[in-house]
Amino acid sequence: MLLCRFMLLPVYKADLLLKVDGNRLDLLKQTKGTKYFDEAGTMDQLSMRNMKIERFKLKKSLQLQIQQLDKQIPSDESQDDDDDNQPIRSRILLLLQVALFEVSESISSITSEIDLISRSAHLNTPPHPTNDPRQSSKESSSLHQKEPQPKESEWRLDGGDYSSNSRKLLDRSGKPLQTFTITNNKQQIKAGTFRPGHSLPTMSVEQFIDQEFERGNVLSGGTEQPESQDIDDNDYNALDAETMKQRQWDEFTEQNPRGSGNTMNRG
């Protein structure tokens, strides 16, 4: 019975190794250790899922049995090594079965993690140098091919070549050797730095309207109401026409009272 208890020591050791900080790959290989049973072969997703569900249910039932045995075993007998104590013997056997399921799950996850770390380490490994002379010549030529540095005369503002002593601006005593003129290009560049990208207006709205008036593009008048012409009392034709117009309007208003046209979409 004492031997059965010591069988759980590798399981506890493996759990501790998984929590240690260090070289993860070495710890995983050390944790996996020697295989005492064959790993499950390739299974489809559905079969793997069903197997995990069955293992989980069986593991839960075993843990419930262990809890029931813990209630039956007195606390003073839990450390007893009596082989005739059947509850203690059954409890240890149940613990071994639970540990077997846990080890099987751990080995599966450890194997997947080892493969993942090995692949990442292989990808991060720099390629080995080749013995091909053509490849080495290409690499050496690419290293020697650098962008040409601009000449001093290309980036200096005055555009002069000062590599020779004959083109120096000052002598040893500090006197100027050549005459030069300071231009206002710097001020022009500074003025255009914060200038907006769009075109700015050259005149105000009032100036534009005045200019349009001068060109004759604006029509004047047309806003005043026409004056009503008074009808002469002696002009009978005009009076008759006005009378007929009023009569026609009265007849229209009688035939079409106010609101009669609003049918409220009733047809």
Image: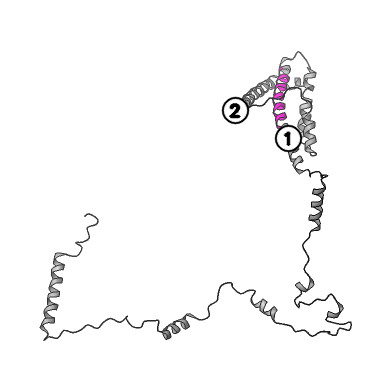
Mark 2, Cα crowd under 10 Å, few <14 / some 14-19 / many 20+, is: few
- CA gap, disc 2 and disc 1: 23 Å
Q: Nearer the viewer, residue 11 or 70?
A: 11
Name the disc covering residue 46, or none.
2
| Residue that appears at 78% across and 37% down | 24
Q: In this view, does 258 lie above or below 53?
A: below
Q: Residue 167: x, y in percent? A: 83, 80
| Residue 88 in the image, given as x and y percentages of width and height | 73, 18
Residue topped by disc 1:
115
Q: Where does residue 70 sit, x and y in percent of width and height?
A: 69, 22
Based on the displayed image, in which of its 4 quarters is residue 7 positioned? top right
Give x and y (percent) for residue 2: 80, 18
How packed mark 1 is, by other alpha carbons closer than 10 Å (few <14, some 14-19, many 20 or more), is few
The amino acid type found where label 2 is placed reads: Leu
Q: Report the residue that reaches farthest toward the top.
A: 84
Residue that appears at 13% across and 78% down: 241
Residue, far right = 172
First in residue order: circle 2 vs circle 1: 2
Magenta stretch holds residue 94: yes
Q: The magenta stretch spans which residues?
A: 90-109
Element under disc 2:
helix
Q: In this view, does 221 lie above or below 256?
A: below
Q: In which quarter of the image is the N terminus?
A: top right
**Viewport quadrant of the C terminus:** bottom left
Q: Nearer the viewer, residue 261 or 131?
A: 131
Main SS category, magenta section: helix
User: Which residue is at the front of the view, 104 or 224?
Assistant: 224
Residue reaching furthest to the front: 134
* Quarter residue 222 falls in: bottom left
> Viewer-proximal residue, 184 or 105?
184
Q: In what element is the residue under mark 1? A: helix
